[in-house]
Every structure is written in C-alpha cells, then in structure tokens.
Image (tube, rainbow, N blue to C red):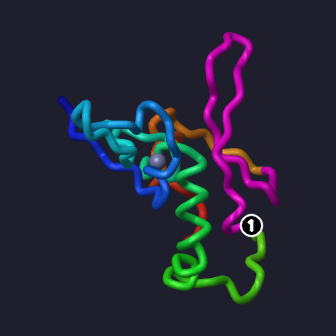
Amino acid sequence: MSELKLCQGPKCHQHQTKDRLKGPKDNKTYQTRRRSSMYYGSGSFCSMQCYNDWAEIFIDRAVDHFGRLTEPKHLTEDNAWQKTYDWNSNDETLYVYRNGITKEERPLTKQQYHDTNYTLNER
Ligand SMILES: [Zn+2]
C-alpha cells in the first residue's frame, strides 16, 4: 500500500463532504483529505478549491519569497523554444522544438519531449 499524503488546503476539513467525515461511529469529524495521489498544485491539493484556499492566504508571501518580477520579461530567440508535436502521413507522432521567433524546428525524441529538464531555452 502506498503512503497517503494530506491535502495542504488550509480549509480542506471545513468543506463538509461525506468522504471527509471520518472516525469512530460516535465521534466522527470532518478531516483533511488523505490520498495516495492528488492532481492539483503539483500533487499537494485534493481540489482546485483547496488550491485556491491556499493561494488566497499564502500566494503573496510565496511570490515575495521566490522573487517578485519588477520588470517585464522579453521573448527573444534564446528563450522562444517550445516543445510541440504533430503527426506525419503514417500517423506517427513527430516531436519537435519550434522557435517562436525564428520558426526554426529541431527534432526531439519522445523521451526529450517528456523530460521537463530538457530544454533549448536559456535559463
Ligand atoms: Zn483538500
């Protein structure tokens, strides 16, 4: 059995749904959801509601902590590479990097396409 994670939503236990009502028969309480995997906020939240509850309270502090933008970023040839895919006439998937400014395309393997660390963009 895989380990269960707790939803990080600060109000998860306040959303009164049947699946959150847990405990012994005579002493059930609404509790934070526990799941083996969650789909929201990189796997930390059970729902968009819980994700938004967290953001409402913590997002300003998080943005300040990791660095608030003070001037606009610019799209340049060096950071305009985007992964995309298409199908050829044999219905095979073709993965490519396409530069949004120069329109140049470079072939990608399926593995490179799915590897979030693999990029042609300057960091
Ligand atoms: Zn939750």
Left of 25 or right of it: where is 53?
Answer: right
Q: Residue at x 36, y 46 (%)?
A: 31
Reply yes or no: does residue 104 show up in magenta: no
Q: Residue at x 81, y 60 (%)?
A: 101
- In this picture, which residue range is highlighted in magenta? 77-103
Q: Residue at x 45, y 37 (%)?
A: 111
**Depth check, front residue: 101 or 3:** 3
The quadrant of the picture occupied by the C terminus is bottom right
Left of 104 or right of it: where is 115?
Answer: left
Snapshot quadrant of residue 73: bottom right
Q: How many marks?
A: 1
Residue 71, given in percent of the width and then of the height, sits at 75, 87
The quadrant of the picture occupied by the N terminus is top left
Circle 1 Cα neighbour tier, 10 Å, few/some/many (<14 / 14–19 / ≥20): some
Reply yes or no: does residue 88 show up in magenta: yes
Q: Is residue 20 above or below residue 48?
A: above
Report which residue position mark 1 lands on: 77
Residue located farthest toward the top when viewing the structure as drawn: 90
Is disc 1 placed on a helix, strand or loop? helix
Residue 52, given in percent of the width and then of the height, sits at 60, 57
Snapshot quadrant of residue 77: bottom right
Residue located farthest toward the left when viewing the structure as drawn: 1
Left of 81 or right of it: where is 43?
Answer: left
Residue 91, given in percent of the width and then of the height, sits at 67, 13
* Disc 1 CB within 8 Å of nearest ligand 1 atom: no
Residue located farthest toward the bottom when viewing the structure as drawn: 70
Q: Residue at x 63, y 28 (%)?
A: 94
**Depth check, front residue: 120 or 73:** 73
Name the kind of residue labelled 1 in the image.
Answer: Glu
Snapshot quadrant of residue 29: top left
Q: Is residue 52 above or below residue 107?
A: below
Left of 114 or right of it: where is 90?
Answer: right
